[in-house]
Amino acid sequence: MADSDIPSTPQRLLPDEIHQAVRPGTALLRLETTHSRQGVLDGAWWPRTRDVEQELPALVSVLAEHLGPITRVGLDATAWDGIPTRLIIDDRVVHLDSFPVGDDTVLVTRGDKDHFALMVVPPDTEPVAARTAMARAVHADNITQATELLVAPLPPPAAEQGGET
């Protein structure tokens, strides 16, 4: 049997149960605190809205459970409806920086040295596209920038993957 005769199945990157459960308001994280991180992104976040004051506290709270206190968050100013200079989250001040970069990421700082980059999936993204982009973002060897992941072609529907016999 030639290699071309073997049906190809795209790599899902996440177990089906997790892939199907991803919805707006979800963050998928692959957090590595070593200096040898290979991937460009440490995770992905799909907020429900573009309201920073509504969306960011839940993300920071979840991250703080795994990383410890979050001191600063950098946001793309073009992606949000107004960004305050700070928020009080879980009784701690979190400083917010905004930059007009258009790179679809949020940068999270723990302490004064550790930085984590999360891809931000726009709230109005179709579920299949959002899930696919998020799965690609958390893959350990991902070297694709967030803006490229969000416009990457989707894998073909399951009916087209195996081909007709």
Image: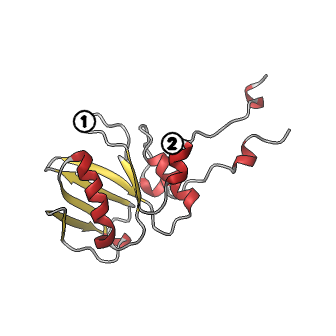
Q: Tell which residue pokes out farthest to the right in this image.
A: 165
Q: Amino acid at mark 2?
A: Leu
Q: Residue at x 33, y 65 (%)?
A: 101
Task: Find numbered disc 2 in the image and state the secondary structure of the residue it sits on.
Answer: loop
Which residue has dot 1 on it?
Answer: 35
Q: How is the image coloured?
A: secondary structure
| Element carrying mark 1 | loop
Identify the image quadrant of the N terminus.
top right
Give the percent coordinates (x, y) of residue 15.
53, 41
Camera-nearest residue between 30 and 88: 88
- Quadrant including the C terminus: top right
**Residue 90's spot in the image, x, y percent?**
19, 62
Question: Relative to residue 47, is residue 112 drawn left or right?
Answer: left
The amino acid beneath tag 1 is His
Q: Residues within 10 Å of mark 2 (few under 14, many from 20)?
A: some
What residue did someone put label 2 on? 14
Q: Is residue 1 placed above or below 126 in the rendered structure? A: above
Whether the residues at callouts 1 and 2 have beta carbons within 8 Å, the answer is no
Q: Quadrant of residue 25?
A: bottom left
Query: For the point 39% across and 61% down, which residue is it?
Result: 104
Which label number is shown at residue 10?
Answer: none
